[in-house]
Image (cartoon, grey):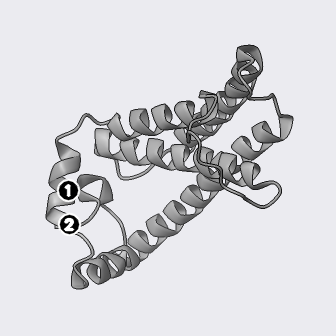
Amino acid sequence: MDLLGDFGVGLNKEYNYFVGILKSVNFVDMHNVKNSLQRFPAWILTIITLGLILWLTLAPRPLGEVHVELFPGADKVVHALMSGFLTFVVFIDRLRGNFRRSISPLFATFTFFGVSLLGVAIEFIQDAMGMGRSFDLMDMVADATGSLAVTVVWMVVEKRMRKNDFHND
């Protein structure tokens, strides 16, 4: 059994090496993780992540009275991380739901633009709501940057894995 189950098909030796490390330290029970994920609909991780992002970005005080002191520009890093994570989860759900071996460049491009447009829409909604959240062009740039970074890294890693699979056959 492996960590990624059916959507981990076709991954190379590095993947198996890291899964072996996780198994050897009993980090998590891989069989239970795989079985738990298979019980849920294919897009559930994307839906949960999207809901969490919408709540964090549109609620007037999503953390309640908790105030966390961060460095200047930390909110841009948070926007990039949220968008990057959403992009990653969409890719994972796509592989899991369709039992595919890879993400096509076309799907990756549509995902990048979709997540980036979501970031733009959130900024306009924040401005229209008038509930203490403000419109910020740099938040949109951070959202697009996070999604683009994950998309590029995913495509490069996937290309290298396909190349390694081809040479190992």
Q: Residue 17's mark?
A: none
Q: Residue at x 29, y 36 (%)?
A: 42
Side (left or right) of 150 relative to 97: right
The answer to whether the residues at label 2 and label 1 have Cβ atoms under 8 Å apart is yes
Side (left or right) of 114 relative to 93: right
Choose top left, top right, bottom left or bottom right for residue 169.
Answer: bottom left
Q: Position of residue 79 (x, y in %)?
A: 68, 45
Looking at the image, how many numbered discs can be counted on the residues? 2
Q: Residues within 10 Å of mark 1 (few under 14, many from 20)?
A: some
Q: What's the amino acid at mark 1?
A: Lys
Query: Can you identify the residue that label 1 sits on?
Result: 34
In the foreground, 41 or 137: 137
Give me the C-alpha separation between circle 2 and circle 1. 6 Å
Helix, strand or loop at label 2? It is helix
Query: Can you identify the residue that label 2 sits on?
Result: 30
Side (left or right) of 119 relative to 15: right
Helix, strand or loop at label 1? It is helix
